[in-house]
Structures are given as C-alpha cells and as structure tokens.
Amino acid sequence: MTPVEFKQLIEKGSKCPESLPKALQALWYDNKGDWNTAHEIVQDASDTDSAWVHAYLHRKESDLTNARYWYRRSEQPESKVGLDQEWEQIASSLLSKVNQAWMQMN
C-alpha cells in the first residue's frame, strides 16, 4: 500500500484494518481526528515505530518535553517540519516497512 492509498482508505471512512501494525493504526485514528484512540494504541507499545508516532502525537498536543522523550525512544530526530508533513513522513516510512516485509514473504 502506498501513502496515497493509505490516506484514501482513511478518507473513505473505511474501518481501520486490524492487520496494520499498531503504529499505523495510531496514525489512522489521528488522521480521523481521534487523538485519544491514537495515543491509547501507542502509549504502552515498546517498539521504535510506535515511539515515533507517540512523539508526533505529543508534539501535536504541544507537549514538547514529552515529545522529545519519545523522539529519543524512537531513535528519530525531533521533527521541525509541519505536523501534516511529519504525519506523511512517518506514514511513508512505516508503509515502506510493511511493503518490504510483504515482499519478503511472497
């Protein structure tokens, strides 16, 4: 799935696929305007992808101290771009990982 296809699925009002990794599920809900559900999905996850989304979510709510903590946990640099652009960057990176894993399995 491409980032454009991912965003189109979200915009169609489709239900979030549970087969997506948790970090992508959180981005899905965030894009739908449901910050709380997005945060619930990643707050207890221990992987770096979820930490990256967690950092983005705290940056979005202007909790920069907490965001910086999660950027460190994610091993990603603190973002300086606009929130929409950061969402796109994260989604693109995570979808690339999913696509690579799928290609290796097939």
Image (cartoon, rainbow, N blue to C red):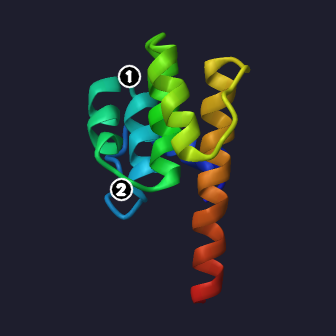
Write down the quadrant of residue 14 in the picture: top left
Extreme-top residue of the structure: 62
- Provide the secondary structure element on which disc 1 rests: loop
Residue 30 lies, in percent from the top left, at 42, 30
Q: Is residue 9 left or right of residue 83?
A: left
Residue 28 location, x and y as percent?
Answer: 43, 40
Name the outermost residue toward the bottom. 106
Which label is found at residue 33?
Answer: 1
Q: Is residue 84 above or below residue 71?
A: above
The amino acid sitting under disc 2 is: Pro
Q: Residue at x 30, y 43 (%)?
A: 41
Q: Residue at point 49% right, 35% down?
A: 70
Q: Amino acid at mark 1?
A: Gly
From where the camera sits, is residue 9 visible? Answer: yes
In the picture, the quarter occupied by the C terminus is bottom right
As drawn, the label of residue 17 is: 2
Relative to 8, does residue 82 appear above or below in the rendering? above
